[in-house]
Image (cartoon, helix red, strand yellow):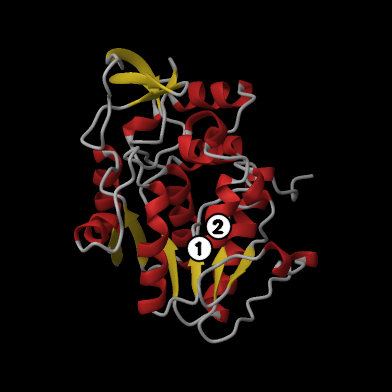
């Protein structure tokens, strides 16, 4: 039918509706934005949702201090291009002040929770957009599009509300807030196909390039001040790309020849591992690693 929506049109329409629903229902929403592909797509959808007006929400990035320079540069260019307001919650500030301690393994991803929840509380954000998708990880698959957090930013799976007929319940008590996931029903392949269709610019780190890496726990990690490599870990140059980006200490690259969007899409379609399952060491700490962090307030 000439009037039928493609699957990407349907996903886009749903996400735009979610953004507009939050704008009408909440007082102080904020968009989590790291400069990674999912947050870039989420921002692109927000720009569409409110065009020609500007996005009515600020952005928030929890900076671990161990982020990839290419991604931070893209973040800053995007903020400047669209004249957006950016809040930065720094993990390093919390370490310097003694409110957090550096982990022995150098990984700072688990340290993001306190800076995130503190900033949500001090800025009185009542809705926080995140780029999480249900296909990424089993704990994320449990979450609704509107996911309630208590006054301590903690998540209780038993308090999940039904969302029949795409009716979203944003009711919350003072001090509580709602995490909102416009990309919940998207897959990694959907994201890449949408990026190609919309001609969305990404950091070059997502495409195959020659890079110095070293092996650890079955992944290729980038050397850095965070503590890698250790004795016995040999640095070598390889042709790699990143499927997801986060803290350098726990985000691995994959061997790849995919230098174009079409090649990345073909590679993604052939993969049998989710991007987090293949390249995120912080999700491998235990069977319930992500769910445990979500209960504490992590995204």
Q: Do the residues labelled 1 and 2 touch (CB within 8 Å)?
A: yes
Of 244 and 150, the residue lying toward us = 150
Q: In which quarter of the image is residue 22?
A: bottom right
Q: In the image, is residue 225 above or below residue 111?
A: above
Q: Is residue 201 left or right of residue 271?
A: left
Crowding at mark 2 (Cα within 10 Å: few <14, some 14-19, many 20+): many
In which quadrant of the rendered image does the N terminus lie?
top right
Q: In this view, does 234 lie to the left or right of 170?
A: left
x and y percentages locating residue 53 in the rendered image: 40, 71
- For marks 1 and 2, give the CA distance: 5 Å
- The answer to whether residue 209 of the structure is visible from this angle is no
Where disc 1 sits, the SS reads loop
Where disc 2 sits, the SS reads helix
Q: In this view, does 292 lie to the left or right of 164?
A: left
Q: In the image, is residue 142 above or below residue 245?
A: below
x and y percentages locating residue 61 in the rendered image: 34, 58
Q: In the image, is residue 221 above or below residue 165?
A: above
Residue at position x 37%, y 40% from top? 201
x and y percentages locating residue 203 in the rendered image: 33, 37
Residue at position x 48%, y 30% from top? 279
Of 95 and 161, the residue lying toward us = 95
Of 43 and 288, the residue lying toward us = 288
Q: On residue 294, which mark appears?
A: 2
- The answer to whether residue 51 of the structure is visible from this angle is yes
Residue at position x 54%, y 33% from top? 275
Crowding at mark 1 (Cα within 10 Å: few <14, some 14-19, many 20+): some
Q: Mark 1 points at which residue?
A: 297
x and y percentages locating residue 43 in the rendered image: 44, 56
């Amino acid at each position: 039918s000439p009037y039928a929506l493609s699957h990407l049109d349907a996903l886009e329409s749903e996400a735009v509706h979610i953004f507009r629903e939050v704008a009408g229902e909440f007082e102080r929403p904020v968009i989590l934005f790291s400069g990674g592909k999912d947050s870039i797509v989420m921002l692109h959808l927000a720009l569409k949702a409110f065009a020609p007006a500007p996005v009515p929400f600020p952005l928030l990035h929890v900076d671990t201090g161990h982020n990839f320079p290419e991604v931070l540069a893209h973040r800053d260019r995007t903020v400047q291009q669209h004249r957006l307001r950016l809040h930065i919650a720094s993990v390093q500030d919390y370490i310097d002040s003694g409110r957090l301690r550096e982990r022995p393994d150098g990984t700072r991803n688990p340290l993001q929770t306190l800076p995130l929840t503190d900033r949500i509380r001090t800025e009185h954000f009542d809705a926080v957009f995140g780029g999480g998708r249900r296909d990424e990880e089993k704990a994320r698959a449990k979450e609704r599009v509107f996911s309630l957090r208590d006054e301590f930013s903690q998540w209780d799976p038993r308090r999940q509300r039904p969302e029949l007929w795409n009716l979203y319940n944003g009711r919350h008590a003072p001090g509580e807030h709602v995490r909102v996931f416009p990309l919940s029903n998207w897959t990694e392949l959907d994201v890449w196909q949408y990026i190609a269709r919309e001609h969305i610019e990404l950091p070059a780190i997502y495409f195959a390039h020659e890079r110095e890496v070293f092996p650890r726990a079955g992944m290729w990690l980038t050397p850095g001040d965070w503590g890698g490599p250790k004795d016995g870990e040999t640095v070598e140059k390889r042709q790699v790309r990143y499927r997801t980006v986060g803290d350098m200490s726990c985000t691995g690259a994959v061997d790849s020849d995919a230098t174009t969007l079409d090649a990345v899409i073909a590679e993604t379609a052939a993969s049998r591992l989710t991007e987090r399952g293949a390249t995120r060491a912080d999700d491998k700490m235990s069977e319930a690693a992500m769910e445990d962090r979500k209960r504490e307030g992590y995204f």
